Amino acid sequence: MRTDTAAAIHLEDYQPAPYHIDTVDLDIHLDPTATQVKATLAIRRREGVDPGTPLWLNGDETAFTGLALNGEALDESAYTANERELVLHAPPADPFTLEIRTWVNPDANTQLSGLYRSSGNYCTQCEAEGFRRITYFLDRPDVLSVYTTRIEGRKEETPVLLGNGNPVESGDIPGTDHHYAIWHDPHPKPSYLFAMVAGNLAHISDSFVTSSGRKVDLKIYVEPGKEDRCGWAMDSLKRSMKWDEDVFGCEYDLDVFNIVAVSDFNMGAMENKGLNIFNDKYVLADPETATDQDYANIEAVIAHEYFHNWTGNRITCRDWFQLCLKEGLTVFRDQEFSSDMRSRAVKRISDVRLLRAHQFPEDAGPLAHPVRPRKYTEINNFYTATVYEKGAEVVRMLKTLLGDSGFRKGMDLYFQRHDGEATTIEAFLTCFSEAASTDLGQFARWYEQAGTPLVTAKGHYDAAANEFTLDLSQSIAPLPGQPESLPAVIPIRFGLIGQNGEDITASRITGAEVRGDVLLLTEAKQKVTFHGIGQRPVPSLLRGFSAPVRMEAHQSLADLTFLARHDSDPFNRWQAVQTLATQELIRLTHEARKEGSLEADDRLVEIFGAILADRDLDPAFQALALELPGEADIAREIGKDVDPDAIHAARTAFRAAIGAAHLAAFHALLPEATQDEDFNPDAASAGKRALAAQALGYFTASGTKAAPERVWHAFQRANNMSDRIAALTILVHQDLPKAGQALADFRSRHSCNSLAMDKWFTVQATAPAQDGLERVKALTAHPLFDMTNPNRMRSLIQAFATGNHVQFARKDGEGFAFVADCVMAIDPRNPQVAARLLTCFRSWRSLESERSKHAEKALLRISAMEKLSRDCRDIVDRCLQ
Ligand code: ARG
Ligand code: ZN
């Protein structure tokens, strides 16, 4: 167990490794508790390094069993070997080979990092620092080697043997019940991209012909019996391969591409070269058990991991500080892919909602860090919404600033110049500044500064001068370790809308650089003047959410209502509704706190009627526009002295008012209309289902007598998981009479499918009822619950902590205490998963004082735990700092 309080690692201390490892030959003899690994490394001193410089290799709980240098055993005084390291004190001056023998116990590996077993199958997870748990190595992303992997196992236990790269050879071992397979990956890669899988797996196959005419064999491996749920993933893979050729000119580079789905996995999925390993949640789907959101997620994650082949694998990171180089860029690429597959506007709105829900709070609290952090103690804690999602926003801004062709030129140059390298954000940006002949010095601040910039805008129309002026400002609130910040380049896509709803063009714009419909805010304060404006315009700012900022545009109710109806930019139409709803929800929250009237403003209630009545709108867009800001969004906007009960009361009251005011419209949209059609997972059908689900929710929220029966009816008639889970959620969250029966029905229907049962746990974990916490505690003892499986744990505990504000942040502190207990119970087995759960405390300081005191107490209890992992230590220390 790692219990040491490790020192921080700093970006500025980066030094290249003193040795190269050109080839790695692995010979792995599988055994559930005693796997033997022989690693033969061809090592070469880096130019300029003094001969005899010690070779220091990483280990982590690594069990040393033997060492030879150039084929000869070594005297014990020549090296040091322990759990954490293998040091060769005086290596030869000339290239040499090192043969390292280690021993691994996959069954005992509960951290799910390194080589472990999932449902009896062997699999690996090496990013970020798992390879060192298999053998001693220069386990850092800038050491690139060509790998050959020989895997040997009992034929019966491990009929399938998979490695990176291309299959080379396989066969039986005469006179034994063993067989072997040899895989060779010709592309030099860092150790974090190593993978192997062995076990009893079923698969589906297909193939893809690349743009240059090479045929690639595609296979998806799953536990036997799950093969019929892989079709959508395979379809998504083929579309991803084609899209990356069409849009980025990236072709696949091996003869095979394998995906393996496992049921015990810490994160979403992993882009190991030629052998992606996935959390089965992001592979398996059929209409009976997967929601539309699951289908969309699978498409996106399959694409994401596939796209890493170029952005991550062919070009990798010099060090882990550059993580956003591959993750932010690859998220951007998968978002673009989904936008091309589906509705771009709906995808953009969904992505911004996620960014605000996860990244904004991270960036406003004790866990805030720049997209490229400067220090870390545990790298696994930096696979964050900031690195991924804000990282993607930064790439998107680059595209906005340079235009489509400038951006593509920069990407082409990046691929051409850095293929085969481990590189940096600076090198990436240089490709764009060269390709587009532009200076990106100030833009680079987006990678260096934490915090969400607040942009304010105040418009003023001068009729006499035919001028419209905007007073703009930007600032970032002080953060721990960042008391001050510098102005960034903020691209603001804008339009000025005239009374007829059409955009007006200015004859001239002064006070800011303007590129097309994007103006560049580069100073802390800027006055921008639009000349030749003959009527008072309504400004539409930050169209398409052109920068990851908070915008305060001080617009009147009339102007926002106007934007909600007339903006030609669908994102800002949606945003106008959100802004209005947020303002009203904040007002109602204050009322709730002083036990005032919870009556919603009719003018705001009416906005939703207009959305429902607009037949030109895409149903998916209508569904999103009808979704009120979440409780966490409202809390974030309020910012301090937060009372989750008041927020909940306000939101519930507002929903009831909207439901009651537009009862007939919602009634007309109830799910029955969609249920008789054959299930189709496409975006259009999903949009109709989403709208029907919203209608059912509001219909019930209205309190109309007919609702409980209608929801129960919808639950029973559902022919797909989206409709079924939508109805179940309403039954349980509104505590309707048939809730218990529906839960029992769902359970008996899906008890054999753990991914479907995860939804059953989540629905209950997120129910805001008074006894919500007691219910969750009881469910931890349910026979289908398993705290040791990350997906199960997240479906109940993490869902409770992040999706049930009123119960998690209970005034009596019991919600915090329960989650703290869970963190402490999980930590000894799986620190990564425990630390992730622990981040749910990150906004504790913004709660009202009684609740925040309880949260602090829970954090202090975790902090006092003996043998707390480095992962949790890091999070708890930062939360308390
Ligand atoms: N690179 C993976 C991805 O595509 C994430 C792996 C993170 N794993 C970890 N243990 N930190 O997003
Ligand atoms: Zn990734």
Image: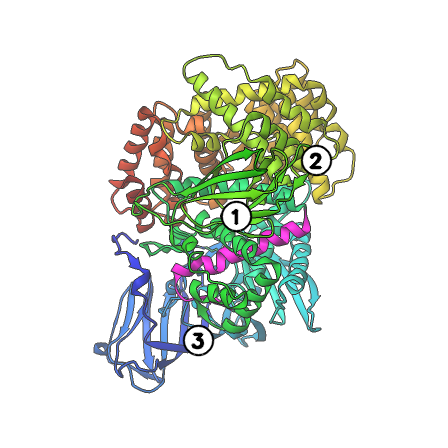
Label 3, label 2: how far apart the Cα atoms are: 54 Å
**Near-viewer residue (471 or 676):** 471
The percent coordinates of residue 245 (x first, y second) are 65, 65
State which mark lies toward you, 2 or 1. 1
State which mark lies toward you, 3 or 1. 1
Q: Residue under circle 1?
A: 510
x 58%, y 66%: residue? 409
Q: Which residues are magenta?
A: 315-342
Residue 721 visible here: yes
Q: Crowding at label 1, few (<14), some or many (≥20) Cα neighbours within 10 Å? A: few
The percent coordinates of residue 304 (x first, y second) are 57, 56
Q: Crowding at label 2, few (<14), some or many (≥20) Cα neighbours within 10 Å? A: many
Label 3, label 1: how far apart the Cα atoms are: 60 Å
**Amino acid type assigned to the residue bearing label 3 in the image:** Val
Residue 681, compared with residue 674, is above or below; it is below
Q: Residue under circle 3?
A: 24
Query: Residue 112: which quarter of the image?
Result: bottom left
